[in-house]
Image: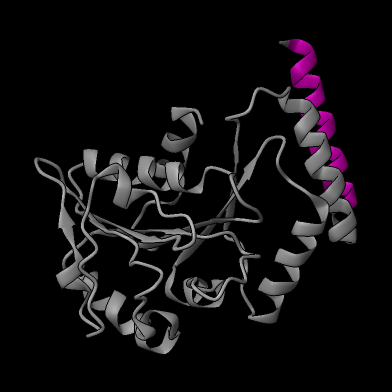
Amino acid sequence: MKYLNVENIYNKIVNSSNRIIAITSTSRYEGVSSIAYSLALRVASAKKKVLLVEFNLSNPYMSDFFKLKDIWQNDKNLNDNIHNIENTELSIIPAPNTLNIPVFILEKDLMKPIFNSLLEQYDHIIIDSSYIGNSQQYNVPIEVIGYIADYLLLVVATGVLREEEVWHAKNKLKKFNLEISGTIINEYKNYRLIDQIEKILKIVKRVIPYSSKACNSIYNILKRMQDCM
């Protein structure tokens, strides 16, 4: 992942309208956690209070990285689970142990007012969520994440995207009347970018038929740029 990507995300979507930003993907291992953490650090560096919430329960990252103790309680009070990172504006709610997940975090109508109350303490909340197609029992589902968030950011990793997972993600989002607000390409694998963009655009054209003309135009522009470099 390039820092430029994080800077672009920050400049384009971190504003007063998008205070709760959720980050997800169509499949595993697309770099959602690293982007969520990097974005939270960027927000904190601007002297804005930011809360990073780890809702990627099946593959938690922050708890181990920061050696945070799981102190979750089933009392609908997330404040007791907040860890403040010393000398920064960053705070973190680590993922609960999958054997002790509070039932309320799986209920969107309970979570919405809880997150709204957290906005009284923080300028922004970044949610590190699992991939859209994750159907494991111990997981915060996308319908809850999408209901909470003001902005739903999709991470697409070069060399990882698979068409069947895109179809599954699209159908799942449609089922719950959710839409992706924006997309970022995570270039953490060493593939030629133009080839990966062509692959992604081909999948998009099959999944969304009326997008064919726009996809062709995008590819032609990128190809001309690539030829000039």
Q: Residue furthest top?
A: 229
Taking the spot 52% from the left edge, 60% from the top edge, the residue there is: 130
- Locate the C terminus and report the quarter of the image it occupies: top right
Taking the spot 49% from the left edge, 61% from the top edge, the residue there is: 58
Taking 197 as reference, is 76 left or right? Answer: left
Write down the quadrant of residue 184 in the picture: top right
Write down the quadrant of residue 24 in the picture: bottom right
Q: Which residues are magenta?
A: 212-228
Q: Residue furthest front?
A: 99
Taking 76 as reference, is 158 left or right? Answer: right
Q: How is the image coloured?
A: one colour
Write down the quadrant of residue 164 in the picture: bottom right
State whether the magenta stretch is mostly helix, strand or loop.
Answer: helix
Q: Position of residue 27 (x, y in %)?
A: 65, 53
Q: Residue furthest bottom?
A: 109
Residue 40's place in the image compared with 132, above or below, is: above
Q: Position of residue 74 (x, y in %)?
A: 26, 83
Name the one closer to the observer, 152 or 63. 63
Q: Position of residue 179 (x, y in %)?
A: 62, 68
Taking the spot 30% from the left edge, 52% from the top edge, the residue there is: 63
User: Is residue 226 one of those drawn in magenta?
Assistant: yes
Q: Position of residue 12 (x, y in %)?
A: 46, 46
Name the one closer to the observer, 54 or 154. 54
